Structure formats: structure tokens, C-alpha cells
């Protein structure tokens, strides 16, 4: 089994804004630990960002990705050496319009503690249909903190690779 390369990442505001928190509703989007309110330390200070599904590190070996995120893809060009496990999140007719329920599908398969799951990568389109896959967004985009990458993946252009 080889790693599939996806060359197009739709880092459209539309894709990231749809899955990010709304700062006006009081959600804390900071990655800093919350103030201690008791004797137990904040969970964010002791948890390593790991994902066993979407965002799991993979090399293209058959069976290394779980059934819930069975595809090993990469955003690397040339001969990729590593990727991450993902799943499809739908189709659309436009490169800047991920499927309406795609972000929710991706979020349901992400068990990392940081990073923002999003239906944000597509295959470039064939015959006017774009097939989308889940990705994990990271870093800061337009003032919104997206988090860090799971499983030692690297944040490149706001996506974990």
C-alpha cells in the first residue's frame, strides 16, 4: 500500500471558520492551561496530544490506519515518506466549498487534545466533483488559534503533515 498524495488543501476561511470556536460566545480558544480551581492540575498540562484515529501518523503500510480513518494520505510532494490517517468527508462541486456536514464528520473521528479537525483537503476535482478528506488544522489563522499537531506531525501552512 502506498501513501496517497493530496496536493490541494483548501485552507479557505470557509473551511476553518466553520469548525472554529466563536470568540463572542465566551469560549476560551487559548492553548494556555486554565487557572487552577482545586487540587488537581489542569488536564492540558499533563496530556500529550495523541490521536488514534484521524491524524494518526502512518507510512503507508497496509492496516496501520484504523477502520474509522482508513486512508493514509500526505500533503508532501514527490515521494512521500510519511502521512496521517484520515477518512473521506464528502463531495462538492466547488474547490472552495467543502461538504456542509464534513467538519462534523471529521470532528467525530478526532480524539487528539489539540488541533482543529476540518473537512479541508480535496483531490483536485474530476468532472466537476471534488472528493474531500479530513485534515487537522494547526497554528494561528486570521487570529484564530487552531492548536498543535498530534503524534509528532509538523504544522505546515496551517495543516498537520
Image (cartoon, helix red, strand yellow):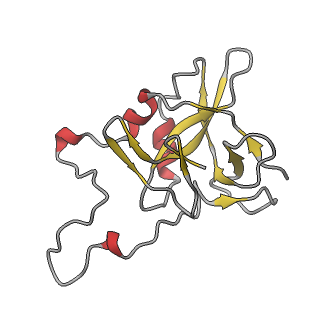
Residue 19: give x, y in percent of width and height: 39, 39
- Residue drawn at 65 percent across, 53 percent down: 84
Instruction: Tell which residue pokes out farthest to the right in this image.
Output: 1
Location of residue 126 (image quadrant): top right
Q: How many numbered discs?
A: 0
What residue appears at the point 79 percent right and 41 percent down from the top-left corner? 78
Residue 136 position within the rendered picture, expressed as x and y whole percent measured from the top left:
52, 48
In the displayed image of the protein, which residue is found farthest to the top? 128
> Where's residue 36, x and y in %?
17, 74
Q: Quarter-wise, where is residue 154 in the image? A: bottom right
Above or below, comparing residue 96 to residue 109 in the picture: above
Residue 29 drawn at (x, y percent): 28, 50
Task: Name above or below for residue 49 compared with residue 137.
Answer: below
In this image, 147 relative to 54: left or right?
left
Q: Residue at x 35, y 41 (%)?
A: 20
Q: Nearer the viewer, residue 68 or 23?
A: 23
The residue furthest bottom is 39
Residue 35 seen by the camera = yes
Q: Is residue 66 visible?
A: no
Amino acid at each position: 500500500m502506498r501513501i496517497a498524495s493530496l496536493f490541494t488543501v483548501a485552507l479557505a476561511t470557509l473551511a476553518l471558520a466553520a469548525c472554529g470556536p466563536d470568540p463572542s460566545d465566551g469560549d476560551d480558544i487559548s492553548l494556555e492551561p486554565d487557572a487552577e480551581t482545586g487540587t488537581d492540575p489542569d488536564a492540558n498540562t499533563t496530556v500529550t496530544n495523541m490521536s488514534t484515529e484521524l491524524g494518526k501518523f502512518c507510512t503507508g503500510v497496509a492496516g496501520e490506519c484504523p477502520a474509522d480513518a482508513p486512508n493514509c494520505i500526505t500533503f508532501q510532494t514527490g515521494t512521500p515518506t510519511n502521512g496521517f490517517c484520515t477518512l473521506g468527508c464528502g463531495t462538492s462541486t466547488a474547490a472552495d466549498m467543502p461538504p456542509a456536514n464534513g467538519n462534523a464528520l471529521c470532528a467525530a473521528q478526532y480524539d487528539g487534545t489539540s488541533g482543529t479537525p476540518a473537512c479541508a483537503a480535496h483531490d483536485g476535482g474530476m468532472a466537476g466533483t471534488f472528493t474531500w478528506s479530513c485534515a487537522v488544522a494547526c497554528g494561528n489563522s486570521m487570529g484564530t488559534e487552531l492548536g498543535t499537531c498530534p503524534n509528532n506531525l509538523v504544522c505546515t501552512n496551517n495543516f498537520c503533515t
